[in-house]
Image (cartoon, grey):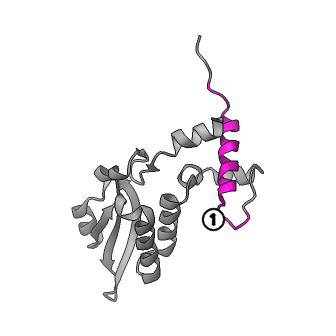
Amino acid sequence: MTSTNQAARVLSIGWSCASCGELIAGIEQGWVEWLAGADEYGTTRLKGLRLVHNLCRYDDRREFRKDQSLVEGLPLARFVGPDGLMLLLSLIAEGEMPRVELIELVKRVHIPGYELTRELFADAIQGGAVSPLIGEGFYLQSEIREVLTWAVKAVGPPEQSL
C-alpha cells in the first residue's frame, strides 16, 4: 500500500465535528443539525447547518433564549448512502435551507476524500500542487488524490525513535 493510500485510509475515517473539531469516527456518532426560526416578517428561516458529534449538539434552551430558534436535526445515518443523497438533494430543491451549507454537507458526506482534503486545498492551490478544473470548492477525485500526495510529501515520513 502506498503512503498516500495508507494516509487516506487512516485519516478519512470520519468527519470533523463543527463544534469541538474532533473526529467523528463513525456514522452512529454523528448528528446533522440546524436552527429554525422566524424572520421579522414571520417567514421561517433555517440557518446554522452543521455536522457534529451526538454529544456536541446545540443547546436547545440557549438557542431559543438567544433568538427564539428551535434546534432541529437528524442522525448522520439519514444522510449517507443513496437515500441520504436523495434526502440532501430534496433539501436543496426545496430551497428552505442555506444552499451553500447543504452543498458543502453533500460533498463532506458523499465525495470520497473530500472531508480529509477540504481544508488543505487553499494551500495546495497557492503552492501550485493542484489547479482545480471545475472551480474552487468543487474538486475531482484526481485532484483530491493530488492534494493527499502533496500533503503526505509536505509532512514527510515520521521520525523513528531509537
In the rendered image, the residue lying farthest to the right is 128
Kindly identify the residue that appears in the image at 65 percent across and 53 percent down. 144
Kindly identify the residue that appears in the image at 30 percent across and 52 percent down. 54
In the rendered image, the residue lying farthest to the top is 162
Which quadrant holds the C terminus? top right
> In the figure, is residue 83 to the left or right of 10?
left
Q: Quadrant of residue 118?
A: bottom right
- Disc 1 is placed on an element classified as loop
Kindly identify the residue that appears in the image at 65 percent across and 45 percent down. 148
Q: Which residues are magenta?
A: 133-158
Counting from the top left corner in percent of width and height, residue 9 is at 54, 41
Q: Residues within 10 Å of mark 1 (few under 14, many from 20)?
A: some
Q: Is 76 included in the stretch rendered in magenta?
A: no
Q: Which residue is mark 1?
A: 138
Counting from the top left corner in percent of width and height, residue 124 is at 70, 50
Q: Quadrant of residue 143?
A: bottom right
Report the amino acid beneath label 1: Phe
Which quadrant holds the N terminus? top right
Residue 121 visible in this rendered orientation of the protein = yes
> In the figure, is residue 34 to the left or right of 140?
left
Residue 95 visible in this rendered orientation of the protein = no
> In the figure, is residue 53 to the left or right of 120?
left
